[in-house]
């Protein structure tokens, strides 16, 4: 038996689905002809309304590849996430939140760990576990994410390929030109230790629109796949026998600006 072909993963974050973006999303998803897995890194909708989720559901319904997603802060804005998730699930999109899933692709087991992540910050701009109860509650929420990330990475350790899907950034290396004054709201490096310890093959996130595409946690490659950063609708990664993903090609034309 020969070496299996690489697993091709199309990824995007911050697609902000609504009726205004329906046509572009339809065209971009229609081009996903040679992809094994589609991952969506949060901010699936413009403001978290279920009818906006219906647009993404319509676009993804019936796709031949598995589709996994996490929610983002935009998806929580209307505080109707149960309805939003129900709409997406009805179209075959599996929404992960502090959970993991497995699938078989090209004769290999693929483990996907998904969670939104949360705020907290990075060196020189981090929220402490001190002070008012509301601030300590924020710290505790991120702690729950860190614990879930550790638990779910351990659950998929035996998979041939392991991917972490987030919305918030786990490293400052993908924040690019985002002003340091808002780093605390873009993610938290408290998410980094489980990643460094378990060394998944690929980590994806969005949220930091003025960030840069490629970063790292230790030796683990991290990519900011927000469409604003990529300048295109999807990026395709190929995970083969090599330890690092091969960034292959794009679908659709680059966005202006």
Image (cartoon, rainbow, N blue to C red):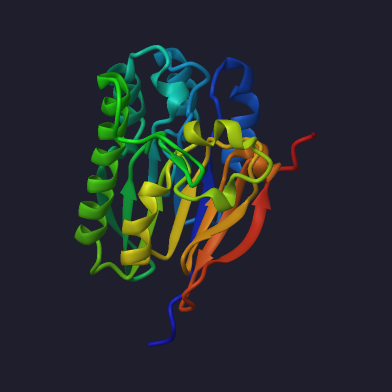
Residue 170 is situated, as x and y percent measured from the top left of the image, at 44, 48
Residue 241 is situated, as x and y percent measured from the top left of the image, at 46, 78
Residue 153 is situated, as x and y percent measured from the top left of the image, at 27, 57
Residue 66 in sight: no
Q: What residue is drawn where x is 33% and y is 41%?
A: 115
Q: Quadrant of the C terminus?
A: top right
Q: Quadrant of the N terminus?
A: bottom left
| In the depicted structure, whether residue 9 falls above or below residue 252 | below
Relative to 235, 257 lies left or right: right
Q: Quadrant of residue 89?
A: top left
The number of discs equals 0
Q: 190 or 235, which is in the foreground?
A: 190
Relative to 171, 94 lies left or right: left
Relative to 36, 94 lies left or right: left
Q: Residue furthest right?
A: 257
Q: Quadrant of residue 228?
A: top right
Residue 221 in sight: yes
Q: Residue furthest front?
A: 131
Relative to 121, 28 lies left or right: right
Q: What residue is drawn where x is 27% and y is 28%?
A: 136
Q: What residue is drawn where x is 52% and y is 60%?
A: 216
| In the depicted structure, whether residue 7 falls above or below residue 93 | below
Q: 31 or 214, which is in the foreground?
A: 214
Q: 19 or 132, which is in the foreground?
A: 132
| In the depicted structure, whether residue 92 falls above or below residue 215 | above
Residue 145 is situated, as x and y percent measured from the top left of the image, at 28, 41
Q: Quadrant of residue 188?
A: top left
| In the depicted structure, whether residue 209 falls above or below residue 47 | below
């Amino acid at each position: 038996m020969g070496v299996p072909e690489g697993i091709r993963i199309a990824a995007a974050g911050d697609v902000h689905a609504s009726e205004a973006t329906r046509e572009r999303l339809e065209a971009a998803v229609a081009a996903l002809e040679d992809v094994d897995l589609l991952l969506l890194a949060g901010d699936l909708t413009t403001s978290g309304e279920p009818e906006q989720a219906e647009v993404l559901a319509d676009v993804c319904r019936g796709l031949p590849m598995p589709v996994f997603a996490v929610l983002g802060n935009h998806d929580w804005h209307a505080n109707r996430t149960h309805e939003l998730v129900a709409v997406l699930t009805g179209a075959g999109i599996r929404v992960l939140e502090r959970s993991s899933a497995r699938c078989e692709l090209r004769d290999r087991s693929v483990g996907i760990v998904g969670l939104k992540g949360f705020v907290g910050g990075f060196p020189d701009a981090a929220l402490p576990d001190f002070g008012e109860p509301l601030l300590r509650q924020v710290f505790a929420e991120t702690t729950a994410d860190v614990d879930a990330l550790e638990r779910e990475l351990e659950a998929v350790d035996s998979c041939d390929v392991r991917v972490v899907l987030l919305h918030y950034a786990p490293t400052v290396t993908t924040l690019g030109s985002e002003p340091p004054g808002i780093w605390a709201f873009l993610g938290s490096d408290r998410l980094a230790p489980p990643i460094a310890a378990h060394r998944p093959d690929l980590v994806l996130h969005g949220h930091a629109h003025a960030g840069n595409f490629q970063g790292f946690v230790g030796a683990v490659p991290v990519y900011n796949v927000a469409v604003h950063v990529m300048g295109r609708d999807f990026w395709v990664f190929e995970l083969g026998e090599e330890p690092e993903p091969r960034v292959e090609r794009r679908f659709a034309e680059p966005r202006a600006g």
